[in-house]
Amino acid sequence: REGRPCRFHQSRLSTVFTGGLLRWRECPALLRGSLSLAGGAAFRDTSSYAAFADVDVDDAQHWCPRMFGPRATDHLLAPLIHGFYFHPLQGCSRALVTAVMSFQGSKALAVRGGWGALPHAIAAGLDVQTGVDVESLQQVPHGWRVRCGDEVVEADWMVLAVPAPTARQLLRSVIPMEQQVLDTGYAAPVHVALGMDAPCTPPPDLPGVHGFLFPPDPPGVVHGVVASMLV
């Protein structure tokens, strides 16, 4: 805040005050909004974003100041959503902020062996081919037909994990719900991550720090940068 790093714990709301991120007079609005959401979270599956579909009705940029106050929005929620979900509050759904604020008590976890262990584990049971250009995808009665040059691959199902512009080029026809997903706008941040080996010791003034969160477009920082340090 005001160019000074403030330390807080994601599962201890009081640390946003004790760490200097918010002034005491700015606390009541955040507390009221958080308590209001906590009551509704008891009846939702907080592990499923779909459980918050009924509150997908407001733009977060306008809703957050009314719910939590303008200072909490600027100094806590905007950096939080931008840092973890790579999107500014403007154009973001109220549902996402509601879900994030319902995670009180949860812990930030990492994958043993690094995030690269996930695709390796998935690929262990698959026939993986790299360096293959997919030219077209066609849905057929028994599944999907994938054309890769002179080769045609048929499968019962398909996971399309590419950016929307590429997906639009590959899919010959889409249903209206798929079209809405493909038309969703993209944020434009750069995520900079620094992973450290287990024996590495962080600086003395950063014990136990998981990462840094910047507000969107802070002064002196390149546009759209999200900085993260994992220790």
Image (cartoon, rainbow, N blue to C red):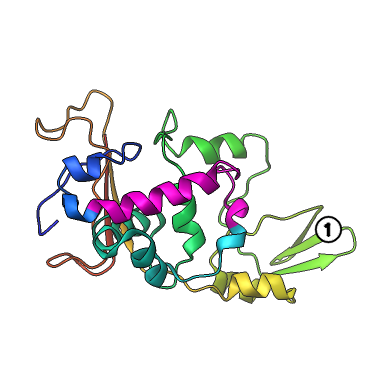
Label the magenta part by its dominant secondary structure: helix
Q: 159 or 50, which is in the foreground? A: 50
Q: Where does label 1 land, which residue?
A: 143
Q: Quadrant of the N terminus?
A: bottom left
Asked if residue 132 shows in the view, the reply is no
Magenta residues, start to end: 27-52
Q: 226 or 108, which is in the foreground? A: 108
- What x and y, as percent, mark residue 23? 16, 52
Q: Amino acid at mark 1?
A: Gly
Q: Quadrant of the C terminus?
A: top left
Q: Find numbered disc 1 in the image and state the secondary structure of the residue it sits on.
A: strand
**Residue at coordinates 23% horizontally, 23% vertically from top-left?**
199
Count of numbered circles in the view: 1
**Residue at coordinates 44% horizontally, 32% vertically from top-left?**
111
Is 221 situated left or right of 99 in this image?
left
Q: Residues within 10 Å of mark 1 (few under 14, many from 20)?
A: few
